[in-house]
Image (spheres, helix red, strand yellow):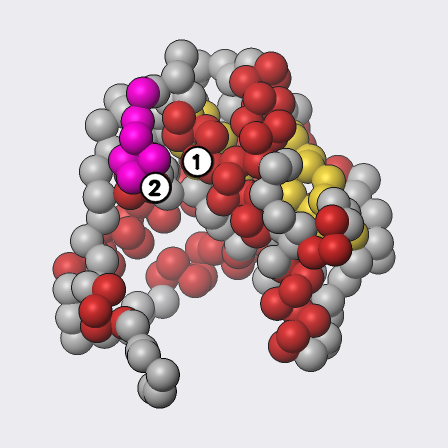
Amino acid sequence: MTLHLTVDELLTTTRSVRKRLDFDRPVPREVLLECLDLALQAPTGSNSQGWQWMFVEDAEKKKAIADVYRIAATPYLEQEKPSYGDARDERTPKVVDSAKYLNEHLHEVPVMLIPCLEGRPDGAPAGMSAGFWGSLLPAVWSFMLALRSRELGSAWTTLHLMGDGEKQVADILGIPFEKYSQGGLFPIAYTKGTDFKKAKRLPAADLAHWDTW
């Protein structure tokens, strides 16, 4: 089923979903491919389209990947979080709590996605690194928007990329580590309810600069 959202509603209510992921409802492959077809319309540098999309449904592999994720996530989530001195501090405890929930239940999601891009930008200058990830991340966000429009949700996570985690996950899934970089780990599930709201953000006027910093 497709939600009838305006463009503005879709953009302002696509959230990182953790506690409201439905672990029990299967996600059909055809729905994921519909979302991916839409995502592949995103821009990519020089029209290279060097992306590959690894979906994981196998229970043993999901558990192994979740175990790798927890090696970095568990100590990170126990660390004291910085204070911003503004409205962001109000949300920090809830964000940490939901992240801990996902950390504990990650292996239970129906599907995981690991988007990959050909090449490795390790140690590359800022311009090359920005161009590299700019050829993948717009498509990933488009995929998340497409999920939302079909009553599914996800969360953008990157903690498995810490240390040797990326290599370990590459070995689990047979991803050619020297040839492809992983752009994150995305749990995918139908959401419990679809009534997501706008998040509290800092005002645009406080973040915009005109002609000089």
Instruction: Please check the rendered image and state whether residue 9 is part of the magenta-colored stretch, yes or no.
Output: yes
Decide which of tag 1 and tag 2 comes sooner along the chain: 2
Q: Is residue 76 visible?
A: yes
> What label does residue 11 carry, if any?
2
Q: Are marks 1 and 2 in contact (CB under 8 Å)?
A: yes
- What SS does tag 2 mark? helix
Q: How many marks?
A: 2
Residue 59: horizontal and vertical position, in percent? 61, 25
Label 1 residue SS: helix
Q: At 22% across and 58% down in the image, what residue appears?
A: 201
Q: Which mark is residue 145?
A: 1
Q: Residue at x 74, y 55 (%)?
A: 46
Q: Is residue 67 visible?
A: no
**Which stretch appears magenta?**
4-10
Q: Report the amino acid beneath label 2.
A: Leu
Answer with left or right where residue 145 lies relative to residue 51: left
Residue sitting at 65 percent across and 64 percent down? 131
Q: Position of residue 158 (x, y in %)?
A: 53, 54
